[in-house]
Image (spheres, grey):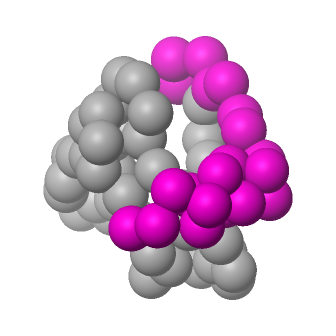
Amino acid sequence: MDEDFRLEVCRLVEYLHCPEGFVLFEEGDKIDFCYVVLQGKVVFNKYNDKARRQDEIGTKSTGHYHLGT
């Protein structure tokens, strides 16, 4: 990727520092963004109605990204 392009992307993005347990989005939300994990880990959970609990269904960690749904 061209260095100028990478610098331009870095200027345009919004950086968020999210504490542990922060909810980035919930099931059913309209997702109109993408994210890149710069450091740490994101855990995807889905509520299990039968078991009445959150089940982990995936993770993304440093260097990974997610593009919408």
Q: Quadrant of residue 46?
A: bottom left
Start-end of magenta stretch: 1-21
Quadrant, the C terminus: bottom left
Is residue 30 rendered to the left or right of residue 6? right
Residue 32 falls inside the magenta stretch: no
Q: How many marks?
A: 0
Is residue 28 rendered to the left or right of residue 43? right
- Residue 25 seen by the camera: no
- Please identify the residue farthest to the top as the structure is shown: 19
- Residue 22 seen by the camera: yes
Say which of 6 and 63 sits in front.
6
- Is residue 13 shown above or below 5? above
The percent position of residue 40, horizontal first and vertical second, equals 36, 23
Is residue 64 rendered to the left or right of residue 9? left
The percent position of residue 31, horizontal first and vertical second, equals 64, 77
Residue under the image location 60 percent in, 67 percent down: 5
- Is residue 64 shown above or below 28? above
Say which of 53 and 60 sits in front.
60
Residue 17 falls inside the magenta stretch: yes
Say which of 39 and 3 sits in front.
3
Quadrant, the N terminus: bottom left
Residue under the image location 69 percent in, 80 percent down: 32
Residue under the image location 65 percent in, 52 percent down: 7
The percent position of residue 3, horizontal first and vertical second, equals 51, 56
Residue under the image location 29 percent in, 50 percent down: 64
The percent position of residue 25, horizontal first and vertical second, equals 61, 57
Say which of 30 and 41 sits in front.
41
- Is residue 58 shown above or below 5? above
